[in-house]
Every structure is written in C-alpha cells, then in structure tokens.
Amino acid sequence: VLLISVLVCCARKPVVPTKLHSLTKNLYCITGLGGNVLVLKTEKGLFMVDSLTPELAPKLVKILRKISNKPVTYLINTHYHYDHVGGNDSVGTQADIYIHPEGKKALIKDQKLKRSNYKFLKKLKTTTGMKLKFKNETIRIYHPGAGHTGGDLIVVFEKAKYIHLGDIFFNGIVPFID
C-alpha cells in the first residue's frame, strides 16, 4: 500500500507556484515558474525578458493578462536555452524578438538537429546591445562577454534600477558555463 501511495503521488504533475510581483508602477517580476520573467508595461504593449518553456507558456499568458490585455511587443531572450526561449511561440506572436547572434546560431543548429521546432526563428532578430526608450523607462541591453553561454544578454531597466541577468547569476550557487 505504501508503494502504491508513493507511485500515485509521484505520478501527479507538480504544482508550479507562481507569483506576480509589482516592482514599480509599470515593472513586474513573475517568479516560481522555474525562472524569473521581467515585464514592463509600456504605452505600446508589454516588454518582456525571457519566455520560459512551452509547457509553462499557457500559465505565463494568464499572468501577463493580469498586467495588461496589450500584446507582448518586445521580447528579449537572455540566452538560447530551452527554459528561456521555449515560450516565444506562445507569448511572442506579435513581438520583435531579440537574442545575441551566438544564441541564434545555437537555436538554428538545434533546429537542424531536430531537437526543437520553433516557429519564431523566422522572425528572430539579433543584437549585441541596444538602447530602447519608452515614456516610462529606458532599457539598455548589452552582451557582457562570455558567461553562462557565449551569447548572454543583460537587460538593465535604468529608471527603475533593476537588472535581469538571465542565468549569469544563480542565487547561492556557481552558474553553469557552456
């Protein structure tokens, strides 16, 4: 009986606790989905950093609707790993999606090896750095050099004084380096 109870408990899908944190009037952090997503509400729509996995995308979309009914218009992928780009096809349908050139190369290689089937690759743009100005925020995106991957991007929200480091920083442990 104990073995059956253990098997039944382990067979259930784990509940993914999520929390929407309001950091400023227009900047939000979504935690608990296996990573952190930053979302800025702008006059044109939502500016988002990372999109998690395809499996978590429906839950992420529901949370985004709590922030705004406007679409995601900018989506920055801090690097090419599955847990940062996997939700792009769900949340980035109307967005300009950016990644570092090395990240795009890695995603194209994965596609050729049939390890992924991302539709967003056709419209994926690359950057090693840029500055975006909105009415309520100035955002700087830059490549700090080799880190977690060869194509990491850091996203700085200047007015709010927040930064998204992707997987360059892990709380309490040394990050994995590709």
Image (cartoon, rainbow, N blue to C red):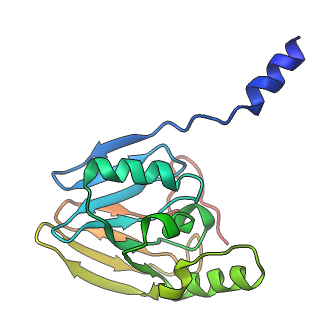
**Residue found at x 37% / y 85%:** 129
In the rendering, at what x and y percent does residue 86 appear?
57, 65
Position of residue 128 relative to residue 17, above or below, is: below
Q: Is residue 166 left or right of residue 80?
A: left
Which one is in front, 135 or 146?
135
**Residue found at x 51% / y 56%:** 57
In the rendering, at what x and y percent does residue 55 appear?
60, 53
**Residue found at x 28% / y 77%:** 140
Q: Quadrant of the N terminus?
A: top right
Q: Residue furthest top?
A: 1
Residue 21 quadrant: top left
Which one is in front, 149 or 7?
7
Position of residue 104 relative to residue 86, above or below, is: below
Q: Residue furthest left?
A: 135
Q: Quadrant of the C terminus?
A: bottom right
In the rendering, at what x and y percent does residue 79 appear?
53, 73
Q: Is residue 33 left or right of residue 162?
A: right
How many numbered callouts?
0
Q: Is residue 176 left or right of residue 127?
A: right
Position of residue 115 relative to residue 106, above or below, is: above
Q: Is residue 96 left or right of residue 134?
A: right
In the rendering, at what x and y percent does residue 157 appear?
25, 66
Residue 53 quadrant: bottom right
